[in-house]
Image (tube, rainbow, N blue to C red):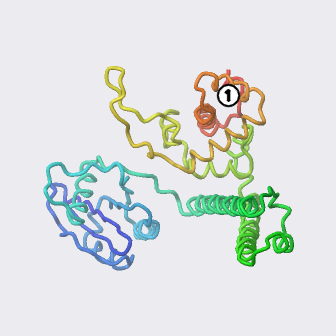
Amino acid sequence: MKLYAAIDLHSTNSVVGVVDEHDAVKLKPRRCKNEAARILDVLAPFQQDIEAVAVESTFNWYWLVDALEAAGYIVKLAHAAAVPQYAGLKHGDDDSDALHLAHLLRLGILPTGTICPQPVRALRDLMRRRRSLIEQQTRDVLILQSMFRRVLGQHVSVAKLDRAAIRTAFPQAADRCAAVAVWETLQGVQRSVAKLERWIRARLRRLPPLIELKTISGIGDILGPTILLETGDIKRFARVGKYASYCRMVDSKRLSNGKVKGHGNRKSGNAHLAWAWMEAANIAIRCNPTIEKWYQRKLKDVKLPVIAKKAVAHKLARAGYFMMRDGTDFDVDRAFS
């Protein structure tokens, strides 16, 4: 008999349930601590008959999916935002959610996400940590510049500041203490970013698809690996439109008779990939005359720079899809004719 298991994963505990091919409950939903050994013990009596295990989680699924796959289970990662809910239920809880996931899995209609292999996932998360450090670096720079403007009415280059310059600049001890603390934090963040970037360049610069991606103006040793790792296997996108949507480059509108009747999930897709293509667009506009000329024409039509830049990013993402799929170089005249 075929069985279908589902796990509703929370921050500290999980709810495990199993149903058969006729939706009969074989394992009444059971709440377990988030311990891989405990969850595997619960599923063990049914393992030979379990076709797949559905896992629903918003952030903390790595350890569980890895443990299930290591134990020989086929794992399906549920797309939490796309899972249809029960209609007409007066009361719902974790037990009903777990059985609902198993029901959708049995029917073959469970919306799923991609499970990246462990090595790729680790590299992808490293690039995300670098981005968060860059954001922290920018915040610290802006804080220091703001302090100099607010207290002294001066505009300074933070790159030229040192501890002695900060101490002599501010007359009040409290301002000196605050500015030095921010400056010291900034120095630590900059050292961490430099260390990560050296590690990334040494290990990722030889990725074959990266060679083609770097033919796009604006993509180098950092944005290139970011795009590759966030994209994953390009073959999982059947069409270029699917990839552009995943990059958040497509409008989310519901139209009827030519009128906008609402919007879909605007946050559906990969925020990190959207950021990477927008960064590439900003640099490409400055570095490539053909792209800059196309951007200026678009800007005259839409009037808003952010929309025109998003249009450039959309075109770059579509070109990147074919480059990663076919292993071809970037043709600026074809993309921005």
Q: Image point 18% across, 48% down: which residue?
A: 87
Circle 1 Cα neighbour tier, 10 Å, few/some/many (<14 / 14–19 / ≥20): many
Viewer-nearest residue: 308 or 39:
308
Q: Image point 62% across, 40% down: which residue?
A: 324
Determine whether, in the image, residue 32 is placed left or right of residue 272: left
Viewer-nearest residue: 32 or 282:
282
Residue 187 is situated, as x and y percent measured from the top left of the image, at 76, 69
Determine whether, in the image, residue 171 is placed left or right of residue 38: right
Q: Is residue 34 above or below residue 216?
A: below
Residue 269 visible: yes
Q: Image point 74% across, 37% down: which residue?
A: 217
Residue 111 is situated, as x and y percent measured from the top left of the image, at 34, 48
Viewer-nearest residue: 227 or 11:
11
What amino acid is labelled 1 in the image?
Answer: Tyr
Helix, strand or loop at disc 1? helix
Quadrant of the rendered image containing residue 31: bottom left
Residue 296 is situated, as x and y percent measured from the top left of the image, at 69, 26
Q: Quadrant of the N terminus?
A: bottom left
Determine whether, in the image, residue 92 is placed left or right of residue 166: left
Q: Quadrant of the C terminus?
A: top right
Q: Image point 61% across, 31% down: which residue?
A: 308
Residue at image mark 1: 295
Residue 326 visible: no
Viewer-nearest residue: 79 or 254:
254
